[in-house]
Amino acid sequence: MSERRAARGQAAGASEGHSAGMAIETRALSKRYRRASALTDCTISVPEGRLSALIGPNGAGKTTLLRILAGMASPTAGAAAVLGDTPRQDPSFLAEVGFLAQEIPLYRRFTPEDHIRIGAHMNARWDATLARTRLEELRIPLDQRVGTLSGGQRAQVALALTLAKRPRLLLLDEPVAALDPLARRHFLATLTTALADAEGGLTVVLSSHLVTDLERICDHVVLLSRSRVQLCGDIDSLLAEHKVLIGPQKDTLPIERTHQVVQAVRTARQSSLLVRTNGPVIDPAYQAEDVTFEELVLAYMGADEASPARHLTTVGED
Amino acid sequence: MISFRVDGQSGVPPYLQIVRQVRQAVRMGVLDVGDQLPSVREVVGAVVINPNTVLKAYRDLEREGLVEVRAGQGTFVRSRPPGPPPSTHFRLGHSLARWVREAREAGLDDESMESLLRITLQAEAAASGSEEIA
Amino acid sequence: MNWVVWRQYRAQGAIALALLAAFTAVALWQGLEVASQWHSLVATCAGNSGCLRQGDLIRGVANGVPYLTLAVPVALGALCGAPLVAGELESRTSDFAWSQSVTRTRWLAAKTGWLLLGAAVCGGVVAVLVTWWSGPENAQLANTFITPQYDTQGIVPIGYAVFAVALGIAAGAVARRTLPAIAVVFAGFIGLRYVIDDFVRPYFMTAVTTYFHLTGPGVSPPGAAWMLSQGMVSPTGQVVSFAVPDMYGGVLPASCQNLLPSLGPVKGGNQSMNAVYSCLQARGWRGFVTYQPASRWWAFQGIETGIYVLLAAALIAVAFVIVRRRDA
């Protein structure tokens, strides 16, 4: 257990020194429609070179956030800086940002080769060879209409086209949601290979439901729930900062006063508090355990109130 | 060339699993001094993990002195971790395999064998500790 | 971007070209047929205008086709204009197109530019063919200033086509779906054409009114003039048409009204009316004809084409603003 903690702390330090700039920075970003708010007061930052997981339940605002960052939609309040610039319809901005929308937008009548040629004409910087090689490695036929390809193949074609732009930032909206496990694995392998090739020059934001997939490949997380940001940061740092404190069922106020309680589960005999530690935990009555990524995500997603601080649940008899 | 396995459920962070697998491979003689480790790209293509994870692992190994990064060429094994040579590991591995077969025939499952090993390690550590004091 | 437009619409372009070629073939075939019939008729009638007017110009199998070309603009607007933006939004390929390195403005400019050019060419080619094909009939009947001859000849078909396509593009950009945009093209185009035809076109230029003696021979504006109204006018400005119900409506002065033949089979025809006319003329009534002279035909065509092209430009501007500003 202590080895894990030490390793995490060391890893957290190593990742901080990796990149200098911020790929994405938002301040109080909001998107209101007539009846509801898709995004409320979102402030996040994603350093360059990260593979960031954008997690949240349906309707949380993930797609809205990605579309605003890609320049496809505009916010109603707040500001966003993507690669240092406000997202806008400008060739130099569009060339740096690759966006893959949820429905995998491709022209069904056209072949992958057609799309590659279209891309060559619509982008100043275009690596057609890269796209063709990638698709050939995956044994996806270049001269077959996209409408007749499988879902996994379509996703790979779309990803290859997005990468052929050689962008500095990739925004992917649930690209693997509709794929079977094998296709999903291939897609994520293509993504991690691209990241390896870019040697820190590529930042990826990937929205998905599947937490287990994401923990393996992502080193940063942005968690949205009900249009608000619940969590944002490097995964290793966050895991190092959070603990589950298990102790007797008694007055937990001292703990709550010092640390930020994210989730509390109280049974007749004990209480279990997931806290964001603000300094060391010195109360001897409590045993501190490490948190898994999945536990962390579920705890923050369950925080129903607007402020991510308190969600106290009482479970029945033990 | 070795291939890595990363177990997401094991509780050990992925980069540490890679470090350990490299160390073990060199101990067992699967990797010799001067052999090249797979490139970050190759690892990441086979095991779907973040490239930074592999970079961290290789950097740690380099800090330990186990590997060296040659610019433009790749990462190569530099020295063996302290301990007995591969032949010793092989020999001990064989006798362990014999013990495992025997334990299985006796009816032990993997979990019991692992607990037995852990208890024995702890007991031996306690015994050698008291020996030193004594 | 031009190559992309070509690649996306080359099938549609080929179909349009094929249809144009087929229409050209039919027009040439039938047009030559009618032209030769006209030349025989002219030779036979040797200057007798009555003979010319009564000659039978059979237009053959494709008799009504020139009139069908009234539908060309709205077809272009519905089939080509409406899906231009709406189709991409519906199928969400806009998410692909608008995340490449061309701005939405450049993307729309390329697509719109080529489509409007294509529409103008289609409209123009069809108009030229119909104008040539209808030459003999125009010469025989002097009917160029009236619908549907006016609407299918000259240059207005180009204006109609460009407008209908622009309407389709703008409607598609606003509605974001093709079917509602097609509905708007039909309703908007037909509605506007009706309004301009009936309520605006007569007033492009101030009409000419010629007065004549009621007892003299009537005045008939020469050539293919556009008759707007005709009748009798009193010294005080009261207007009565030559139609029977109007004359019996009690507007005429009593003394002249009494001279009107009784309702029922007319005896003696014009002679009985002559008495009425003399009576009215004595009281200062005059006959009048209000019309647009035939010489103004090209001016009218130019004005109307200009109106439709300006409207098209406004609609395209709207489309650009919508595509650029709105969320994708």
Image: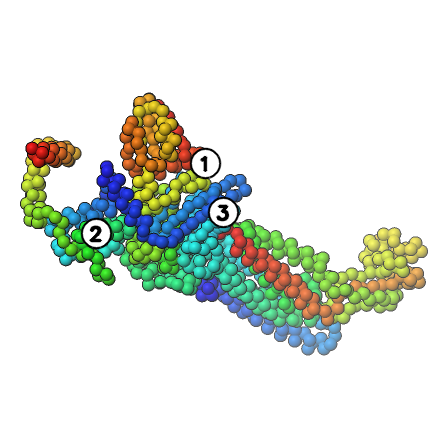
Q: Which residue is mark 3?
A: A78
Q: Which residue is mark 2?
A: B63
Density class for disc 1 (Cα within 10 Å; few <14, some 14-19, many ≥20) is: some
- Measured Cα–Cα span from mark 2 to mark 1: 45 Å
Q: CB atoms at circles 2 and 1 under 8 Å apart? A: no
Q: Chain of mark 3?
A: A
- Measured Cα–Cα span from mark 3 to mark 2: 45 Å
Residue A306 in the image: above or below residue A93:
above
**Residue occupying image coordinates x 68% and y 58%:** C196
| Percent coordinates x, y for residue A303 in the rendering | 40, 34
Residue C173 in the image: above or below residue C149:
above
Of labels 2 and 1, the one closer to you? 2
A164 or A274, which is in the foreground?
A: A274
Q: Which residue is mark 1?
A: A306
| Percent coordinates x, y for residue A254 in the rendering | 36, 28
If the image is split into quadrants, where does the N terminus of chain A sit?
Answer: top left
Of labels 3 and 2, the one closer to you? 2
Same subunit, tags 2 and 1: no
Q: Is residue C160 left or right of residue C99?
A: right
What's the amino acid at mark 1? Ala
Q: Is residue C49 left or right of residue A310?
A: right
What's the amino acid at mark 2? Arg
The residue lying furthest to the front in this view is B133
**Residue occupying image coordinates x 50% and y 50%:** A74
Callout 3: SS: strand
- Measured Cα–Cα span from mark 1 to mark 3: 18 Å
